[in-house]
Image: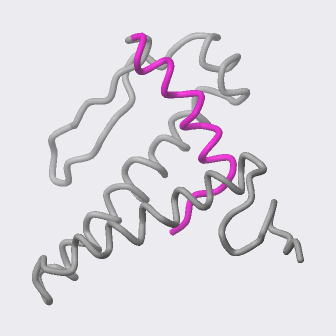
Amino acid sequence: MKMTTKDKEFLERLKPLFEKGDVSVEMKEGVLRHLVLRKNYGSKMERVFHMTRQGVRWRFQRLFNHIYVEAYCTILFIETAFGTHLRQQAMAIARQRFELRQRVRQGGRDASGFQDGKHQG
């Protein structure tokens, strides 16, 4: 499952609130553990995220309990089968892709000659 532009915008809006302590993330115990967003009440959440409180909870659930946790489940499955010796290479590839996406997103040109998704000959 890939992150969407709306997911990225949500995380960018969540980060300052998290750093200021306006919201927090906790693990909830149960049959299946999961992460929950705390202190996400009031009209401030609607103003910051431009969505209802239920929408904020849904987006948080999707990102932190589906995409984030499932990424680690996939890594655990692969490393159980093949070991951890490929981890450094996979991380190097992931960092490179992340940096390229950041540059393209900021309007920068990457090494392949692409700018904003269009080839510059």
Image x and y of residue 87, in percent: 22, 73
Q: Is residue 106 left or right of residue 25?
A: right
Q: Quadrant of residue 21?
A: top left
Residue at horizontal 48 percent and vertical 20 percent from the top: 40
Image x and y of residue 70, in percent: 34, 64
As for residue 51 lying within the magenta part, the answer is no
Q: Is residue 115 left or right of residue 39?
A: right
Q: Residue furthest right?
A: 121
Image: 93 above or below 52: below
Q: 101 or 36: which is nearer to us?
A: 101
Residue at horizontal 34 percent and vertical 35 percent from the top: 36
Residue at horizontal 30 percent and vertical 40 percent from the top: 35
Q: Total label count?
A: 0
User: Magenta region's main secondary structure?
Assistant: helix
Q: Residue furthest bottom?
A: 81
Image: 107 above or below 72: above
Q: Is residue 103 left or right of residue 120?
A: left
Q: Which residues are magenta?
A: 1-20
As for residue 14 lying within the magenta part, the answer is yes
Image: 78 above or below 57: below
Q: 98 or 8: which is nearer to us?
A: 98
Image x and y of residue 57, in percent: 51, 36
Q: Quadrant of residue 55?
A: top right
Residue at horizontal 31 percent and vertical 57 percent from the top: 69
